[in-house]
């Protein structure tokens, strides 16, 4: 191989005993590429940035796996090789252990290492039967193995001595796979906190307590400058299909059902033949539902004169290798596979990807699409032909090509706008749009109406939270958790109660009533709800794992909505509407938000939660005085004092503590519905009196109907969309057991009235 010398763009990649020949401060790169990326004459700007940021992360946060997330075809292996060799140069006695889940991926990385001439082959070793060209030894400075082999050998004591004087860097390729497998947990136990651990993945979905995204770029970030531009064509199959899931994955029998449908298969074959006959689809990879499906498609295409072979795990390795080699050199036009070619298979000339199978995995989708994304001198575009079925149920759990190629999830691209959002609501007639977030699909929100949340957390055990070292240490843990997933900025230090008024940041503040309060930045539209979902999911996971944090009866959830209740008439109209709805709204939250919590699932029916008193329990005189003078008491079910600020906000304090976005988002949606139906034209008198008078006393059906939220909403002319109504009904049903501990006789009447029946409709 002929080698050309180029200037190294990253300091520290110069001559040393690691390299096979003496050279200036430069890197030898192959003039003949083995992996599209190795042919580059210099590192790309984002690769340089990735190296620098990841090295900083490895130094500053050694207790977690630092993950480089780059799309397939963008050179994440090259980035990791540079980081690894810089580690060896920086530490003369240091070592690198490179792990992947298959020997094919290990071989690809070793070829990159040798072909770039970064390190002499005499310094490379292996553990396992793969890579026979290298010695099997732990004495080499750069050791390759598979995750499975390494864990098997580790059980027998065949490991690097840790801790030791030789700094070790462990690189885990396709770390999303290792993170979810039992073997991945063994690796974490063996290395985390004892060695630097670097993970590589195109679409990481990881435990944020053990993994951190050190650097990320999405497909959309790097296209078209560095990746080929995809043209996505959706082809309707005409088939109706309902996926069946096992956990997060589509069950094999459900995929087999699709693969066995003859009309669907004929649609796939005929689509290919039409394009092939028009001079398209010269180098195509087809992803099938299962092995049988792959064989069927390959046979049908072969019978019609297409040079095609199936490649899958049910065939002997020699047959698969021969088909792949023939495809590389152009003797075959088509390979049909299942998942075998999703990793470590690089043929830059691929011009078309056929997605003949659905997927619920964004990782798998990224790997399939990535086979065609490599850019060459002769190729800057590729086609994705996606076959879509009519899915009546659970369709929101499926990913499509557009979901991957058109999204920009990286936080840097969002923050670079530097735009401070202000609270606002739409000036004209409110418009509603539906969310497509997993778990809240179809839940409506008011377009352009800003919102925010305050999530309260408390301490476990007997610790009484105060602003001390223990409180601050836990607050920093919450901050790090949010920083790992948030797109919007995060304040990097804990704050005293309402210390900061920067509404563009996530903040963690002290709250004397519970301990910690997570305050969101201003959020808006679908992007805001997606941000809320990311953070709440991470915090939920943190609370479940934390020995210090919990959500209990002391905690609440507050939501804020932008409003313009800037006249006594508007304030009166909206507050009156709430007095009419309040009895029903309390059935959608835990009884601890109404009654004083005494512990052990007991309540004082005579005493109210002092932080969430019902508005309807004010007197008419006090109510009217508050409307005129902005003097509503703060600790009521809604806080109307914040309407007197420069930015007018409605604060809803009714909800019990939770970190689950599947509960938070429908609650926000409901209040957007309450506020925006008949906005500023609310009519009707306020209703005063006790919420649930008589407490646990048995009541009549007529009284129960006045406490039914769906009937009350109907009387206000508020028609809930089906998805939202269903989720609220499910929430009321889930809370029935909690209310049974508070007012069992009353709940029995609610039950007899059919409130908890699956086919319930308000009378």
Image: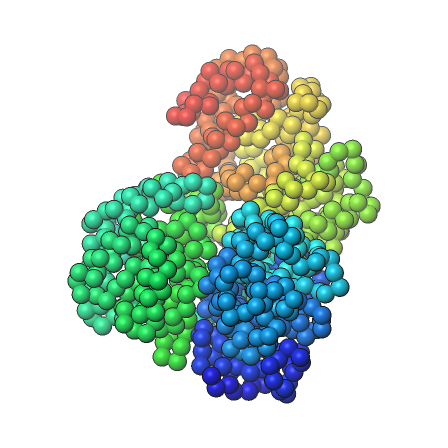
Res 104 seen here: yes
Who's the residue at 68% across and 42% down the image?
A: 546
Is 748 located above or below residue 562 in the figure?
Answer: above
Image x and y of residue 538, in percent: 60, 48
| Quarter containing the C terminus | top left
Q: Is residue 28 above or below residue 526?
A: below
Residue furthest to the right: 468
Q: Nearer the viewer, residue 625 or 264?
A: 264
Residue at the spot 60% in from the left edge and 35% down from the top edge: 655
Q: Specify how the rendered protein is coloured.
A: rainbow
The one of 454 and 652 positioned closer to us in this rendering: 454
The quadrant holding residue 652 is top right
Q: Position of residue 326 (x, y in %)?
A: 31, 70
**Residue 631 appears anywhere in the view:** no
Q: Residue at x 62, y 34 (%)?
A: 656
Residue 624 location, quadrant: top right
Lateral position of residue 263 relative to residue 520, left or right: left
Q: Is 252 situated left or right of 205 in this image? A: left
Give the residue at x 54% y 60%: 128
Residue 706: percent from left, percent from top: 51, 22
Front position in the image: 49 or 139:
139
């Amino acid at each position: 191989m002929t080698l050309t010398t180029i200037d190294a763009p990253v300091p520290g990649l110069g001559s040393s005993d690691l390299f096979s020949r003496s050279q200036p401060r430069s890197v030898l790169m192959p003039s003949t590429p083995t992996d599209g990326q190795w042919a580059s004459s210099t590192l790309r700007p984002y690769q340089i940035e990735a190296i620098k940021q990841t090295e900083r992360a490895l130094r500053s946060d050694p207790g977690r796996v630092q993950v480089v997330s780059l799309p397939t075809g963008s050179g994440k292996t090259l980035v990791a090789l540079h980081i690894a060799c810089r580690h060896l140069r920086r530490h003369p006695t240091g070592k690198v252990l490179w792990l992947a889940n298959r020997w094919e991926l290990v071989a690809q990385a070793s070829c990159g290492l040798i072909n770039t001439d970064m390190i002499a082959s005499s310094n490379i070793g292996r553990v396992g039967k793969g890579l026979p060209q290298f010695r099997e030894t732990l004495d080499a400075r750069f050791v390759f193995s598979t995750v499975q082999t390494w864990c098997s050998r580790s059980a027998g004591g065949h490991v690097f001595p840790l801790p030791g004087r030789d700094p070790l860097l462990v690189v885990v390729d396709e770390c999303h796979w290792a993170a979810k497998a039992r073997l991945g947990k063994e690796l974490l136990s063996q290395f985390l906190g004892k060695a630097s651990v670097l993970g590589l993945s195109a679409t990481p979905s990881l435990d944020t307590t053990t993994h951190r995204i050190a650097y990320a770029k999405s497909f959309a970030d790097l296209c078209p400058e560095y990746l080929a531009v995809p043209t996505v064509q959706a082809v309707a199959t005409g088939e109706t299909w309902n996926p069946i899931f096992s956990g997060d994955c589509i069950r094999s029998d459900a995929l087999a059902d699709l693969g066995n449908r003859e009309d669907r298969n004929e649609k796939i074959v005929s689509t290919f033949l039409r394009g092939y006959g028009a001079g398209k689809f010269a180098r195509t990879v087809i992803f099938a539902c299962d092995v049988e499906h792959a064989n069927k498609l390959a046979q049908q295409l072969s019978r019609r004169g297409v040079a095609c072979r199936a490649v899958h795990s049910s065939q002997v390795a020699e047959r698969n290798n021969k088909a792949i080699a023939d495809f590389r050199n152009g003797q075959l036009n088509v390979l049909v596979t299942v998942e075998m070619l999703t990793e470590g298979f690089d043929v830059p000339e691929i011009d078309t990807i056929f997605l003949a199978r659905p997927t619920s995995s964004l990782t798998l989708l990224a790997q399939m699409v990535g086979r065609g994304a490599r850019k060459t001198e002769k190729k800057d575009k590729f086609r994705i032909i996606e076959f879509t079925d009519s899915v009546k149920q659970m369709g929101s759990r499926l990913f499509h090509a557009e979901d991957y190629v058109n999204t920009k999830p990286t936080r840097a691209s969002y923050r670079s706008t530097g735009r401070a959002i202000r609270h606002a609501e739409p000036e004209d007639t409110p418009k509603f749009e539906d969310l497509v977030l997993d778990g809240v699909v179809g839940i409506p929100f008011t377009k352009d109406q800003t919102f925010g949340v305050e999530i309260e957390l408390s301490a476990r055990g007997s610790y009484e939270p105060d602003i001390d070292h223990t409180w601050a240490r836990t607050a920093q843990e919450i901050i790090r958790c949010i920083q790992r997933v948030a797109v919007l900025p995060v304040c990097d230090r804990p704050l005293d109660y309402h210390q900061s008024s920067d509404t563009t940041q996530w903040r963690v503040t002290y709250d004397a009533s519970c301990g910690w309060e997570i305050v969101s930045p201003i959020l808006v539209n679908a992007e805001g709800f997606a941000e809320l979902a990311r953070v709440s999911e991470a915090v939920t996971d943190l609370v479940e794992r934390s020995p210090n944090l919990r959500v209990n009866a002391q905690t609440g959830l507050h939501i804020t909505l932008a409003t313009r209740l800037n006249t006594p008439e508007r304030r009166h109209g909206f507050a009156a509407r709430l007095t009419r709805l309040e009895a029903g709204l309390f059935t959608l939250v835990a009884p601890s938000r109404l009654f004083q919590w005494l512990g052990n699932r007991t309540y004082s029916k005579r005493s109210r939660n002092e932080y969430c008193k019902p508005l309807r329990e004010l007197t008419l005189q006090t109510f009217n005085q508050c409307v005129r003078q902005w003097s509503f008491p703060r600790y009521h079910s809604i806080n109307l004092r914040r309407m007197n600020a420069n930015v007018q906000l409605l604060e809803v304090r009714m909800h019990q503590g939770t970190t689950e976005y599947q509960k938070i988002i429908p609650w926000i949606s409901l209040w957007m519905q309450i506020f925006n139906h008949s906005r500023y034209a609310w009519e009707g008198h306020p209703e005063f009196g006790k919420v649930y008078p008589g407490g646990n006393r048995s009541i009549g059906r007529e009284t129960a109907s006045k406490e039914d939220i769906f009937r009350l909403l109907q009387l206000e002319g508020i028609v809930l969309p089906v998805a939202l109504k269903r989720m609220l009904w499910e929430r009321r049903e889930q809370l029935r057991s909690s209310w049974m501990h508070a007012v069992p006789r009353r709940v029995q009447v609610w039950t007899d009235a059919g409130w908890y029946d699956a086919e319930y409709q308000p009378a």
